[in-house]
Image (tube, coloured by chain):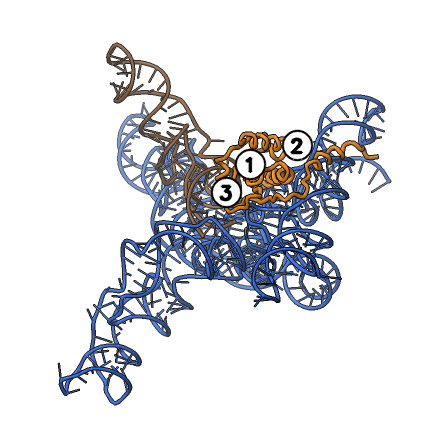
Chain colours: A orange, B blue, C brown
RNA sequence: GCGGAAGACCGGAUGGCCGCUUUGUGACACGAGCGAUCGUGCAUGGGGAGGAAAGUCCGGACUCCCAAAAGCAACGGUGCCGGGUAACACCCGGGCGGGGUAACCCGACGGACAGCGCCACAGAAAUGAAACCGCUUUGGGUCAUACCAGAGUAAGGGUGAAACGGUGGGGUAAGAGCCCACCGCAGGGCUGGUAACAGUCGUGGCACGGCAAGCCCCACCGGGAGCAAUGCCAAAUAGGGACCGCGUGUCAUCUGGCCUUCGGGCCAUGACGGGGCCGCUUUUGCCCCAGCAGGUCCGGGUUGGCAGCUGUAGCCGCAUCGGCAACGGUGCGGUCAGAGGAAUGGUCAUCGAACCGGGGGCAACCCCGGGGAACAGAAUCCGGCUUACAAGUCUUCCGCGCGG
RNA sequence: GCUGCUGUAGCUCAGAGGUAGAGCACUCCCUUGGUAAGGGAGAGGUCGAGAGUUCGAUUCUCUCCAGCAGCA
């Protein structure tokens, strides 16, 4: 009765990058100063978001084996509902991808964009995110 | 059946996978501690956005500040009457006015003889009522008008938002509430109503324009600020600047202490007096009268943590009693988010309204494919108001048409 | 979250119930060999939006919208 093909396609895309139990820890940025430091760092713009990456210095108090992420949406993105929805989707792609593809000791900040972040297909957001990570990690070497 | 009116409800559904937050339990693991225990993780069970969470327009609870209270003033608000409520600018019922064929809807709806102010342009005149153009008549004058002087009038006078009652009749030289009828107005009596107000009967012949969302008067209400309030801990910076108190009181010693050249002096204490503390007054209270301390504000630093923080004027459901109703009383049961760069979701599938395309049918409509759901996110908490809102559901009522 | 303030010509601001104005900028003309300055003339306004009060609203009242500032 149910069409067998369609649901599996969606699930594979989501499960393929489900993180295994790794020792890397994810933390969320809460301080305004951290966001301001990340603003002056290298960034990559994609249709759905802007990714900024900053390598922490050794003397900073945060543990060196953690990955820290921040999510931000200005008022330009829309009203409170639109901003919250954009941040949730950004949080989700970061949660799925960073434990595997992120580098410990780095701060990542994802910035939401008007209309696109909330409506773009999820699979494309994910591939764009991996692409952006590769660019940033490549330029560093 | 079509077109309306009022009220109430709902605010996509189901499932898979992966998460967030809070809380209960655990003989579990790790860390801290002598320990009670605490923190982190794990396992397992429960809870987790709205009718507007919005705008921040009112009213409160709560916290801090101004010495307390009363009166007055100032400032702000409310404004037909009665009731409800913790309170309100809210709600309910009634009155009056306006709109609609009706169901029903709307109304900042006290006072313009307490006073001041304004009423542009037009118009004879914009509030004291008269003057002006007119109308009529008497005398003079003339062939007759015209014209001059006197008397009587306020009907008429293109305007204007608004013109000193309106319409009709009588009356007159011409006219006029001069007289009469009806309408309006003012003031009085009676009746009904708690009241707003309504009805009715005389009287007066009309005097009294509009604006109070202009100042204002009257009645009533209100101290100010807000959870980024406020309290505590930690860290960090500075030991800074400005201003205010500003008056050296009298008496008592049979009180206490110290000093003494035995006159007394100093400190404490008491009484009186003076000064200061809310815009003013009164009462009460507090502080000061030689202490070098006190107070207020500014500047500088920190943008970390904890409490406040979620259950009560509670709220919700059911029953019952009182009330036209808002609402109140009683009983039983249930408890309902607590985040803090801010959780309450992400994703996939299925079902799904409007709408679009194709086909069928006289038509209502049916089939296939596409399509894919409004406004919108708690931030201390309640009661309202206002504004935004796709599609849908229910109840009652009104008008028109058709049929019985 | 709370509390204030402001929306008038392209820009900066006046105006306070009765035909909306100033300066700069713009267009045309004069002046100059040419330009600037100067002089003259002109154009440009849903007075943030919608209701209400008034005969009449940019002004008074209410409700929305947008922007700015302050408070730990």
Identify the subunit bearing mark 1. Answer: A
Q: Are marks 2 and 3 on the same chain?
A: yes
Quadrant showing the C terminus of chain A: top right
Earlier sequence position, callout 1 versus callout 3: 3
Residue sitting nearer the eye, B344 or B368: B344
**Label 2 – label 3 distance at C-alpha:** 38 Å
Q: Which residue is mark 2?
A: A121
Q: Secondary structure at mark 1?
A: strand
Q: Secondary structure at mark 2?
A: loop
Residue sitting nearer the eye, A52 or C57: A52
Q: Give yes or no for contact between labels 1 and 3 (Cβ–Cβ under 8 Å).
A: no
Residue at the image point whose x is 64% and y is 38% from the top? A100
Residue A85 can be seen in this image:
no
Residue at the image point whose x is 66% and y is 32% from the top? A121
Mark drawn on residue A111: 1
**Label 1 – label 3 distance at C-alpha:** 26 Å
Identify the subunit bearing mark 2. Answer: A
Image coordinates for residue B78, horizontal then vertical, percent: 49, 53
Earlier sequence position, callout 1 versus callout 2: 1
Image coordinates for residue B323, horizontal then vertical, percent: 67, 62
Q: Which residue is mark 3?
A: A58
Residue sitting nearer the eye, B377 or B167: B377
């Amino acid at each position: 009765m149910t069409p067998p093909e369609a649901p599996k396609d969606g699930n594979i895309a989501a499960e393929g990058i489900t993180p295994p139990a790794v020792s890397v820890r994810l933390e969320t940025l809460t301080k305004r100063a951290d966001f301001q430091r990340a603003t002056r760092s290298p960034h990559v713009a994609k249709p759905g978001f802007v990714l900024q990456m900053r390598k922490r210095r050794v003397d900073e108090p945060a543990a060196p084996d953690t990955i820290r992420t921040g999510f931000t949406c200005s008022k330009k993105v829309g009203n409170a509902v639109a901003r919250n929805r954009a941040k949730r989707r950004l949080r989700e792609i970061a949660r799925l991808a960073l434990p595997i593809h992120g580098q410990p000791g780095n701060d990542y900040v994802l910035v939401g964009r008007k209309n696109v972040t909330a409506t773009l297909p999820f699979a494309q957001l994910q591939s764009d995110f991996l692409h952006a990570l590769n660019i940033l990690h490549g330029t560093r070497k």
